[in-house]
Amino acid sequence: MTVTTGTVTDWAATPEWFADTAAKESALKKRQAMDLFLAGIERRGFQMARIAIGDPDEALDLVQDAMIKLVQNYSDKPEAEWQPLFFRILKNRIIDHHRRGNVRNRVVAWFKPKGDGDEVYDPVALAPGHVSDQPDHRLGNADAIEALEQAMKVLPERQLQAFMLRTIEGMDVATTAEVMGCSEGSVKTHLSRALHKLRDLLEDYRPDGCSGPSCD
Amino acid sequence: MNSENTKETDDSLNRVADTAAALLQEQRESIDAAMLSRLNQARQNALMEMDRKPPVLSALWSWVPVGVVAMMALLVAGVAFNVLRLDPVVQPMEAPQTVKSSPDIPNLEMMFADEGLDMLEELDFYLWLEEEQTTGKLYYSYEVVT
């Protein structure tokens, strides 16, 4: 229906105007919801990427890439799906980064002369020292955080993913399985192994200073 | 006994998880301002992608590639169909058969002759016009015809 005033048509009262206004309001609300979601998740995503790959600048690039992909491809999905979608994208980006790094390292190794005393990746050497090596085993949270991060870097990729998604993100087993692309049983296995390893590596950083099974 | 050991282990692992979660939370809260600013910029860059998509058509954008492929498929099919129709080797044209009129068989030409009826009515006029032009009596339209 068109409202005509004299010879001028008032478009503002037309159904098309209402439909256009409603569409714009809907788009604005969705944008605000996406802004709120990304603001809440950016730190956790950055932390996950940085622990997984080490370099903070590259971790930031991966997080931005994951955000852009989420907005481009999945912004029309329900909000409840954004969290698992974002971390699935980020997980894939981290895997791609590792693969590129492996290929690059292999290529470099081919051209590098042997006998240069290359540093070998030694997870045992990276693990924190035993508490008996320190005069005071209460080292504070900064060292504990550093020790935890070093211990997490030692974990196999899948165990690290399961640990971070369940522990940092608080995802349930089903959602974690969806993000990781595996079964719920695999998630529980990966998480259990990760926690066992972390417990062994972080035994010296328990808040009460106690160690061993007698303290449980 | 075994269940007690299992419960002890589970409790121990839960404490590891809780402690780790708390430490990582503290680490997140200590991210420096420069990195927070860069994270904010990354978020704004991502939101700009959302602004680029028109809101009304955002749901339809995913169908554009499918639509393009469908149109191209139709185009190819149309061209192929026309090529096959015009190819005398593939489909030899048969001579049109005349329909013999009969009281039992309706004259199809008469039935579908409506669209040419107006032209047929003016056919006499066109024939006269041609005749007049040929004889020279009607050379210009504004000339007096004698």
Image (spheres, grey):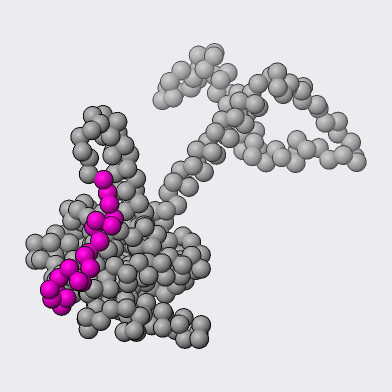
Q: Nearer the viewer, residue A80 or B98?
A: A80
Residue drawn 28% across the image and 57% down it = A124
Judge left or right: residue A7 versus residue B125. left
Judge left or right: residue B20 versus residue B76. left
Q: Which residues are magenta?
A: A120-140
Image x and y of residue A122, in percent: 27, 52
Judge left or right: residue B124 versus residue A173. right
Residue drawn 86% across the image and 34% down it = B101
Q: Quadrant of the C terminus of chain A?
A: bottom left
Residue B119 showing in the rendered view:
yes
Image x and y of residue A33, in percent: 28, 72
Identify whether B27 is placed above or below A60: below
Magenta stretch, overall SS = loop
Q: Nearer the viewer, residue B18 or B87?
A: B18
Q: Is residue A126 magenta?
A: yes
Q: Nearer the viewer, residue A36 or B136?
A: A36
Image x and y of residue B66, in percent: 48, 47
Residue B125 showing in the rendered view:
no
Image x and y of residue A201, in percent: 29, 67
Count how many numbered circles sit on residues in the image.
0
Residue drawn 41% across the image and 79% down it = B9
